[in-house]
Structure formats: C-alpha cells, structure tokens
Amino acid sequence: MQKTRKRLSHYWPNYVMLLPFFTVFAIFFIYPIISGFSMSIQHWRPNASFDFVGAANYIKVLQSPRFIKAMTNLAIYVFTTVPIGIMVAFGLAILVNSFQGKWSQFFRSAYFIPSMIPIFLAATVWRWMLAPDYGTINLLLGLVGIPSIDWLRNPQFMISALVMVDVWRSVGFNMIILLAGLKNIPEMYYDAAKVDGANTLQQIFHITIPQVEPILFLVTVNGFISAMQIFDAPWIMSDSNYSMGYGGFLQGMLFPVMEMMGRAFGSSNFSEASALGFILLVIILIITLILFALRARYTQEM
Amino acid sequence: MKIKFYTALFCLLLVSLLLGACAAPSAPNSTNNNMNSSDDTPSEPGQAAEEPVTLDFWIYSDYATGPALEMQNTFISEFEAANPNIKINLISKPGTDIGAGLIAGAVSGEMPDVFVHGLGDTPTYSTLNILENLTPMFEAMPESYKNQFIPEVLEKAKSDGNLYGLPYTGYSTMLYRNLKVLKDAGIDPDAGITDWEDWMNQMQKVNANGAASIPVLTINWWPVEGIYAGQKDSMTGFDEQGNSNLDVDKLADTISFILEAQELGTQVGIFDQGAVDLFISNQLAFFPGGPWSDVTFRAAVDESGLEYDKILIPGVSAEEHGGVKGYEYIGITTGPNVDAAWKWATYLTDVEQQVRWSSTLGRYVPNQEALDSPTVKENALVQLTADSAQNAVFDYPPYFKPMPPDWMAQVNDILGGAASGIYTPQEAAQKIVDDLTTMYNNK
C-alpha cells in the first residue's frame, strides 16, 4: 500500500498528462461501444424504458435475406479488390522504384493523387464515367467494338465497377508504403542474385517479396479492414437513399455497413443496426486474427 | 506495471460509466406524447408562450436559398414583429439530413421545434413517436383557416384520425419536351400528345431521327407511377382491407408501354445527371420530371439556347393524364414549445403567406384558397402543377404505417427484372401488387 502510494505520488503528473487522451478515448470510443451494445440487446425506442431482448436482434439480423446478400457481396468484393489492389500497388511500386530522379517523383505523385480525392467526389466522377451509352468507359469500349455495359445496374458488373473505383483510389497510397519498403532493401542482395544468374522475376519472388513481407502484410490487413467497411462508393454509385431504397438493382451493391445505416436511418431500427455493427466487428476481428495467425505460421516456417 | 495498467483501465471504465449516466436523453415535456391519444384537451389557439421562446425551424435547403430565403426572412420578420416573445431560428438542411437529423435528435433529445417533412417520411417519425398531435389545436382554429386546404391533402396528414402536419408545399410531375428534337423529327409540338399511342408514334419518329426518346424509367417506382396514373381511376396506396389499390392489368399495360418506349430511348436513368444533360444538349426528346427541373431548363435557355416546354404527362386516352404527386408538411415535435410552434406553423401555412410564396417563387401549394387567387393563377408553372395534381397519384403510400426498410428497393428490383426480361410485364405487375400487399400487412 505504501509502495503504491509512493508510486502514485511520484507518477501523478504522468497520469494527469494521460487524462485528456483517456477522456477523449472514453467519450468517442468506449462509450459508443457500450451504448451500441446496450441498444443491440434491447428493443430500443426513444424515451422508452430498457426492454431487454437478449440475442433476438442478432438472430433476426443473421437470418435476414438482406444481411446474407450483403455479406455475399462483401465476400466477393473483399476477395477481389484486396488482392488486385495489392498486386497493382506492388507492381507500380517496383516500376516507380526503377525510375530515377524527376521521373520517379513525377510518377509517385501522379499515382498518389487519386487517394487524395474525397471518396464522394471520386464515386460521383466514376458514376459519370461508367454511365451507359455516353460514359467514358463505354465510349472506350465502343472503340474496340464492345457494346455498352450498364455497369451500375447490371448485377454481373456492379461489383466490378466498385473494384475499379477502389483500386484506382487506393493503389497510390499502398504504392507509397510499399515503395518505402523497397527503398530499404540492400542493393547487395540484388547484386548477389545477378551474379548467381537470377532473372528479374526470380529476384522479385526470392528477394523483393520476402524483404517487404512485413509491409505487404500491413497493407493486406489494412486493405481487408478498409474493404470490409465499404459504404460511400456503393451508396453514391447505386444512387441510394433511405426513403427510395438502397443497394442498387437486386441489391447488387448492398454491403453490411450500408444495410446497418439503412436499418438505423431508413427504418429507425437502431437495435438491429447496432447488432449488425457488432456482428461485422466480430467478423473483422476473426479475419484479422486469421491473417495474423497465417503470418505467424509463415514466419515460423521461414 | 500491472498496477499502472489496471489503474488506467479503471479510469477509462469510470469515465465511461459517468458519461453513460450523464448522457441519458431528457424526456420531452409534452402532454401529447402518444400518437394515438384521442383525449387531449384542446389548447387555446394563438396563445403565445409567456416566456421568450426561440423556435428551431428546420427547412429544406432549397426552400432557404436565393429568393426563397428572402421570402422566409420576410415571413420571419413579420411574425417576430407581431410576436415579440418568439424568435425563429431558421436552419436549412438537405432533405435526407432533416430525416437523419430527426432520427438522431430523437435518440439524443435534441430536436427542432418545427420542421418541414415529406409525406413519405412519416412512417419513420411515427415509429419514433416525435410528432405532436395537432388535432385539438386545429379543431379550435377558425373555419376559414381549416377550409383553405385541399381536403385530400389534409386527410393524408392524419393517422388514426389525428392530424400530424399542416400542408405546406407540394409537387406533381409533368412532361418536359425538347422542342428542337421534336421539330427535327418532323413533329409539330403545337399538336401536343393525344394519348399513349400518339406518344409512342412521336417517340418512334424521334428515335428514327437519331435522338433518344426517353430516359430509363424502370430504375425506380416513382416515374412508373407517373405513367400508371394516366389511366382512369388509378390509385396507389392500400384499401381498408390492406390490399394494394394498384390494378394489375393497368400496371402491366403501364410496364409494357414503358418498356416499349425505353427501346427507343437511352440507357441513362431518369435520375442521372446524364439525362438532364442529354435533354439540354438536344439529344433527348422527353423528360418526365417535377417542377424543380424547370429551374435548370430555364437557365439552359439562356446558356445554350434550349427550346422546351412542359405539358401534362399523357394518359392512355385523351381524357386522362398522368403524374405522381407528393406533399410537404409542417410538423411540430413533442416538446415544451408546442404553443409557440403552432403559432408559427399556422402563420406560414395561412393563405396570405401561401399566396406570396406561390406567386413569387412559382411553387405549388396545397392551399386551394391560395391557388384560386388571381396572382397565383397567373403563374403558368403553378397552374400546370395544380392541373397535374388533379389526376396524379400519391407517391409513396402508405403514410404513417411503417413498411419494411427495403420495400421500395423490392419494387424497383421487380421493375428492373421486367426491364431485363426476368419477368413479363404481367408477371411483374402481379408480383408488385402481391409483394406490396404482403409487406403492408406483415410489418
């Protein structure tokens, strides 16, 4: 007890300095989580008393066709956009890394610019570009004899359209991160490989990728988490709104966060919306843990 | 180390619990909390609150910009001069922000006193139980005030016999025609459009001349309703038995007509900016839209020489015409400022203000007395909107009764299915009627 009192009296300035952070953290992180969980286990109504329903909201969400459709779309989207995005970013990083001087700076900036554009603006511009008949993409396809595609209303192509937007927007940021990793690879590894007769592709697979593996992993995890929370782009591109419907034709652009927002602000069902939010949280946690476990196993094997 | 960790964790939890205890929303202090209450004692009309009151008034952003904002400020100045103890705090928001803000406000207890809302939003507000029952106050008003509103519009603002909004503004759709595109196709615009058959003939001529006749309408229920209304005795909504008022055969005919028309049109959807651009750039002949589109097209007359006019949406015969209509109401939230809010709401919706609002801004109002005034009758756009509203169908019933959150999306999907050949028009029509009836009765 005396030791504790002595420690507290010695370190109290440190605790006082930490207090602002913990206060803000509690207000904007801990409290919303507790409040959201509380809403998810009750039949919430404004100004009504607590009406505990247990896991009923969770079961209702998990059984709803719209949630299943949203998760299906999410799975297709995540396992398409993340690998493609990372491969493109990695390829661009290698390409830019091979440039010298002004060209390196120019392409680094050029590829990074899309990631600075607000997502609502990017989605709006892409909506115009993907428009049938007169959109830029369809005009270009027409030049090579491909008929106009209704990217935003044909369920076969809706997620492809989203992947295009996401890759275009995210590739610059990931490229910059990977580029930083590439810059740290000692040149002597490549010199030694060249002496041993390794070609470019072999150098990439046996030197570059193992050396930037930690950064690749970071970018992959970040990509998964970000992709699983997608909302803005499909909302705008499918012309969704709370009163006239959201998710696009045959819910081709319906995703879990959109469904959560729709349940909350479309039908004022905050209980189910909160439950959906926690379900998504658990799924993201599970996937992240799986990724970490796979990496740990990969590192162990190495 | 362990002690530091647990101390930090304890501090976090303590702050969270304190915040949770302090942040509980305060219950509104109102005698009319229950939407179904029918035993409220009427309050004295026009009785100003004794204490100074500031009313937060939420309004659509396009009702509070440019000339509309000037008019609002005029009304506020006049009202505040007549009621020195009441101040109006005008807050403009996009439509979706008003809805989202009210929902968030219901959670936090921070709601406006008065707000403008569309009929289609009422199910959300009824679920949240935030609308003040205006029946006692309305019944106590003079007959001259009560009789000025269009009766069917007033009825739509009622749920279980209780009134929850005062009719304020409205719209009804019309058909914009690009006159250059028509003339280039050899069509005389002055001849008008007699019926659907005549309209289809004109669309064929436009298409044969290389232009598009119409944008895609089947992306949404709203424009399809406007065409559906062009058949005798067409109604939307539900009857007392809970069955959809839609007629399957009439709806099937509507869908068939639209699909045939869309073959002669563009793949650009009616809500896409591209459709407006095509119309302005003389590549699209017909644009079914609301009065709000007139502002854009009028500007294009000066900017790019657009030649256009607007007519009633043609019906299946010469005696009919189509259109879809909706209305905005002034609602009052449950709270301590109901009396003052009622004074402001009745002032805004009274005939004198409605005449000024309508005649100056060219906006349709659901106030028959205002519509009958000579100054309002002079405005061609208001007159056309009023004529359209005579036969148009209501946009998104049921009002007040909550439907599944995806009900509109389901109908849109069926229309999309008809457009892509998944359903025949008859199958699509039957499915729409069946699904709407099921959703209405199951929710």
Image (cartoon, rainbow, N blue to C red):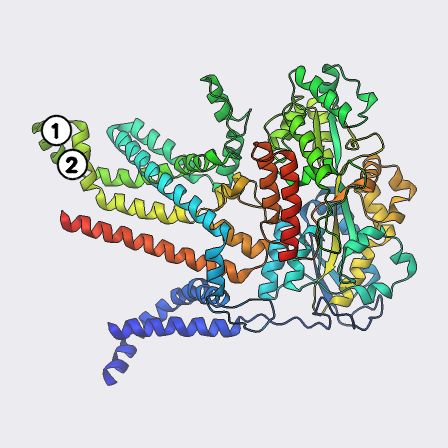
Whether B119 is drawn above or below B251: the answer is below
Amino acid beneath label 2: His
Q: CA distance from mark 2 to mark 1?
A: 9 Å
Q: Residue B167's spot in the image, x, y percent? A: 79, 53
Task: Determine which of the numbered discs, if any, sits on residue A206 in the image.
Answer: 2
The residue tagged 1 is A198
Quarter that holds the C terminus of chain B: bottom right
Using a 10 Å C-alpha cutoff, classify the residue at mark 1 as few (fewer than 14 neighbours), some (14 to 19) or many (20 or more). some
Sequence-first tag of 2 and 1: 1
Res. A174 image quadrant: top left
Q: Nearer the viewer, residue A16 or B395?
A: B395
Secondary structure state at the residue bearing disc 1: loop
In contact (CB < 8 Å): disc 2 and disc 1: yes
Tag 1 subunit: A
The residue furthest bottom is A2
Give the percent coordinates (x, y) of residue B25.
58, 70
Relative height, residue B356 to residue A281 (above, below): above
- Dot 2 falls on a residue whose secondary structure is helix
Q: Is residue B162 left or right of residue A30?
A: right
Front-lying residue, A34 or B119: B119
Report x, y in % for residue A287: 32, 52
* Rendered image quadrant of residue B50: bottom right
Q: Please, what is the three-letter code of the amino acid marked with disc 1?
A: Ala
In the rendered view, tell whether residue B242 sits above or below residue A90.
Answer: below
| Visible residue check, residue B94 | no
Q: Position of residue A150 (x, y in %)?
A: 52, 30
Badge 2 density bin: few <14, some 14–19, many ≥20, Cα 10 Å: some
